[in-house]
């Protein structure tokens, strides 16, 4: 079927539906191509929405919790909203005033992505952004997101191309909040094998890494408030994070390409109401524009390309 459209208040939504499985994905093109909802079939073919969506026009405009947002050209924080690149200092907008003020989750969240009609159709939805530079990030980039369905799950291919005449620092992330319809304290979490990054009181890496025994096997989240980043051990292939309902045995699996210039990190964050859990594939760690952890430098014409996705089990 063709790509459908509807609105939440004044904000348009584009939807792609798989005619065979009924799987669907909905996107806000004028709000950074934010993923509004993902609905996938289970083992028995039953369809279930997986994301905690934004419910009102005001929530879409504020985007307070970055629900479903694409985080580019950096994910997470740049401490104090200042960094140096190749000998020059840059000061992006302080979008997060707490913890002393940081530049948070990049610049594209509120930008308008355009539907690539030539590449989109009944099998995929492709959205693109030609960014001409922003405060504290003056370089032009082209960002492309391709959404499609694979093995009854969602596949998302994302690229950032350097359109400048000089080198450009980039990072990429995605910020979906998943729900199984119950308190996440009652859900089990399984994380990829890797090292947990130590954090300062300002929620940026402090330079330490350690093994973390929790969630090496599936276990209840419980009362812990999670805001943790894992540097994934695998250097190639695919890593997965699983969130499951222990009573039904059903759940979701977030998979991500790993390795150099891929999704080498995953962040998990418990929403304060504990009704959902953010599982965030990231190509770099928080504050990468200062600490260099996973930061990619693109030469003119080069692109960062990586893939992640979601499926039910």
Image: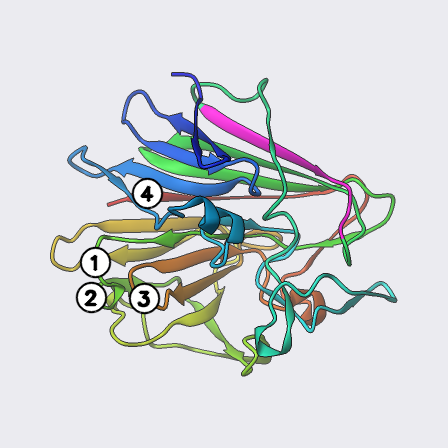
- The CA span between labels 2 and 3 is 13 Å
Q: Which residue is mark 2?
A: 186
In the displayed structure, 219 sits above or below 247; it is below
Which is nearer the N-term, disc 2 or disc 3? 2
- The CA span between labels 3 and 1 is 11 Å
Q: How is the image coloured?
A: rainbow
- The CA span between labels 4 and 3 is 24 Å
Q: Which residue is mark 1?
A: 182
In magenta segment, residue 69? no
Q: Residues within 10 Å of mark 4 (few under 14, many from 20)?
A: many
In the displayed structure, 16 sits above or below 277; it is above
Which is nearer the N-term, disc 4 or disc 3? 3
Residue that extends furthest to the left in the rendered view of this protein: 247
- Residue 47: assigned label: none
Q: Secondary structure at mark 4?
A: strand
Q: Are marks 4 and 2 in contact (CB under 8 Å)?
A: no
Q: Where are the magenta residues, as a range?
A: 124-134
Q: Are marks 2 and 1 in contact (CB under 8 Å)?
A: yes
């Amino acid at each position: 079927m063709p790509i459908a459209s509807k609105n939440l208040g004044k904000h348009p939504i584009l939807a792609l539906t798989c005619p065979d499985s009924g799987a669907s994905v909905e996107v806000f093109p004028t709000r950074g191509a934010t993923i509004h909802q993902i609905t996938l079939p289970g083992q028995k073919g039953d369809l279930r929405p997986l994301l905690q969506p934004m419910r009102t026009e005001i929530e879409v405009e504020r985007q307070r919790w970055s629900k479903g947002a694409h985080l580019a050209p950096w994910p997470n924080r740049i401490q104090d909203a200042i960094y140096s690149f190749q000998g020059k200092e840059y000061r992006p907008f302080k979008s997060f005033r707490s913890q002393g003020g940081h530049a948070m989750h990049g610049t594209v969240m509120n930008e308008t992505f355009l539907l690539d009609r030539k590449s989109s159709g009944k099998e995929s939805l492709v959205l693109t952004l030609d960014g001409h530079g922003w405060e504290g990030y003056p370089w032009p980039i082209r960002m492309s997101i391709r959404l499609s369905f694979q093995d009854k799950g969602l596949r998302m291919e994302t690229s950032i191309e350097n359109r400048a005449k000089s080198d450009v620092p980039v990072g990429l992330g995605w910020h979906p909040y998943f729900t199984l319809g119950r308190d996440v304290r009652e859900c089990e979490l399984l994380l990829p094998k890797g090292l947990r990054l130590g954090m300062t009181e300002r929620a940026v890496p402090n330079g330490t890494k350690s093994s973390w025994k929790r969630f090496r096997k599936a276990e209840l989240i419980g009362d812990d408030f999670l805001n943790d980043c894992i540097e994934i051990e695998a250097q190639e292939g695919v890593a997965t994070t699983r969130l499951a309902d222990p009573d039904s045995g059903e759940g979701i699996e977030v998979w991500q390409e790993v390795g150099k210039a891929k999704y080498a990190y995953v962040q998990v964050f418990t929403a304060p109401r504990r009704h959902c859990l953010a599982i965030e594939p990231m190509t770099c760690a928080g504050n990468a524009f200062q600490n260099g952890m996973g930061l990619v430098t693109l030469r003119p014409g080069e692109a960062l390309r990586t893939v992640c996705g979601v499926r039910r089990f």
